[in-house]
Image (spheres, helix red, strand yellow):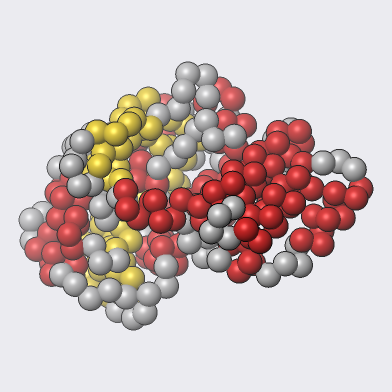
Amino acid sequence: MCRCWGPAEMPPRVSICIPAYKAERYLEETLASVRAQTFTEWELIIVEDGSHDGTEHMIRRFREQGPQPVRYFRHDHNQGLSATRNTGFAQAEANLLALLDADDVWRPTHLETCLATLTAESADFVFGGCQIFDSDTRRPIAERTPPAGAMADFPLSLHDGRVVIQPSTVLVKQSWMMRCGGFDRRFPICNDLECWFRIAKLGARFAYTGEITCDYRKHRAALSKRSADLVAECAQIHRLHRDWPAIPAAQRRVEMWRHHRNAARMLARQSPLRALALMLRGNALRAILPIPVIISLLLDSVPAELLLS
């Protein structure tokens, strides 16, 4: 289902894509940050993923506050974050996609800064830094920015985790998102990391703005429940991309082993069999000897729900 409001005589330069699921609690603040942008040649696309709250009503009110095109889509049934993002990308009219989650907040110069960096660096994919804050107390927790020298070591620094890209800071050319196939529905938690890996492997030029232009809301309770699954999913992503030519083979093996080991440690008490499978697979993938490689191949036949359920 689609609701479209606003003039469309001239195509926007940026399509802002917001996935929404039970989003009404934080959405108003997110939308206010969009309206406050110093760069104004945008359209807003919001996709509600099967929930039933006040999201559509809030979008209607938002549309009345300004001239930019606003389009609302709905999934009749919940399809997950990756599918919801991809629905928004497919509807975008602009050549540039700006990602924004329904509970995060942009600072006023976010789009302006990303566009300036895109031009200055001749980049295909731009991201900014973010301030992580506690959802309940609103207290700052940490800043997420690349350490010194990390971008000069890209994509190795993305692969080993020195560079962490928060989706709500990203501006990417639509052509590259379409070329990589969008977000992978197999990864309910770390779908962003897996998408960045694919775009980087295809050869896109990444650039960092050098500024913090986004406030990222951290929900402590939700993260604590999913932390083990998050680490296990990261291990699966590194295993999936173990053929990345730009990353030295030794680093690929070490990172696969590290993520499998960490996931196994976190799961040891609650799911010992799953932890054992992850540890064996990690050790096998790190090794060069034929026997461990054979073990890894055998473990490929283990049902995914055992490793990542």
The one nearer the camera, 269 or 8, is 269
Residue for point 54% across, 49% down: 266
Where in the figure is residue 308, as x and y percent of width and height?
58, 62
Q: Does 248 sit above or below residue 54? A: above
Residue for point 27% across, 56% down: 102
Where in the figure is residue 13, as x and y percent of width and height?
32, 48
The one nearer the camera, 137 or 29, is 137
- The quadrant the C terminus occupies is bottom right
Which residue is most to the top?
148
Q: Indicate left or right for 176 with 169 as reference.
A: right
Residue for point 58% across, 60% down: 271
The one nearer the camera, 218 or 97, is 218
Where in the figure is residue 210, as x and y percent of width and height?
37, 25
Q: How many labels does the image show?
A: 0
Which residue is most to the right?
290
Residue for point 20% across, 47% down: 136
In the rendered image, is residue 5 in sight? no
In the rendered image, is residue 159 in sight? yes
Where in the figure is residue 1, as x and y percent of width and height?
30, 79
Which residue is most to the front?
269
Q: Quadrant of residue 120?
A: top left
